[in-house]
Structures are given as structure tokens and as C-alpha cells.
Image: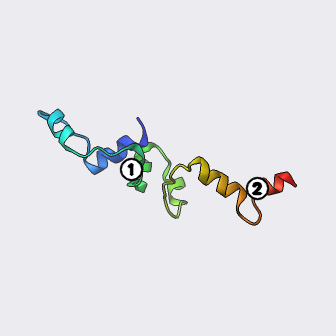
Amino acid sequence: MGLEKFIERRLGRHVLGFNAAERGHRRHRLTGAQILQHVEPEDLLSFGFIPEFIGRLPMVTVLAELTEDQMVSVLTEPKNALAKQFAK
């Protein structure tokens, strides 16, 4: 079971019982990336992280996947770009 399932359970998006299929279709379904935006330290604890590790994280954030154009921009445009260093 992935981290998304723990977050869904906490948010109450997991539908059980009679007429669950009907209620599930009426609800707006969130994608995995949208669900991860709602992650809390309690979710990480439920997922299996140890409390000592979670306590050392000052904040929890979610990163979006870069497109190919964004990746090229990051590798080539800055003053000390990685691509320029390797070319040198």
C-alpha cells in the first residue's frame, strides 16, 4: 500500500459500505500527485517512518516532475550551469 492510501484514508476519500460505488463516482477523484500535496507527518508515521526521523524534518513538501524543457533550462541557463562545467 502506497503513501497515497494513507492520505486518502485520513482525508476521508476512501468510500466503504452500501452504495459505495455510486458515491465514489460522484466524488471528484484526485490523482496521486494531488493527493501527495496533502501529506502530513502523521501520514509518514502511518506509512512506516520512525518518529525520530520525522522529528528531524523541519518541513515536508511535494515536488512536481519537471518537463524536458524545464530540465534543459536548469542544466544550461544558470551562471554556473552543470552542463557548462562538464563541457569545460
Q: Residue furthest bottom?
A: 79
Front position in the image: 64 or 61: 64
Q: Residue furthest left?
A: 18
Quadrant where the N terminus sits is: top left
Q: Residues within 10 Å of mark 2 (few under 14, many from 20)?
A: few
Quadrant where the C terminus sits is: bottom right
Q: Quadrant of residue 84?
A: bottom right
Mark sitting on residue 78: none
Give me the residue at 75% from left, 59% from top: 81
Tell me residue 82's x, y (percent).
76, 56
- How far is mark 2 from mark 1, CA to CA? 31 Å
* Mark closest to the chain's N terminus, 2 or 1: 1
Q: Is residue 75 left or right of residue 47?
A: right
Q: Which residue is mark 1?
A: 34
Under circle 2, the secondary element is: helix
Give me the residue at 20% from left, 38% from top: 25
Under circle 1, the secondary element is: helix
Q: Is residue 9 left or right of residue 23?
A: right
Q: Amino acid at mark 1?
A: Gln
Mark sitting on residue 82: 2
Q: Amino acid at mark 2?
A: Leu
Q: Is residue 14 left or right of residue 2?
A: left
Tell me residue 64's x, y (percent).
50, 52
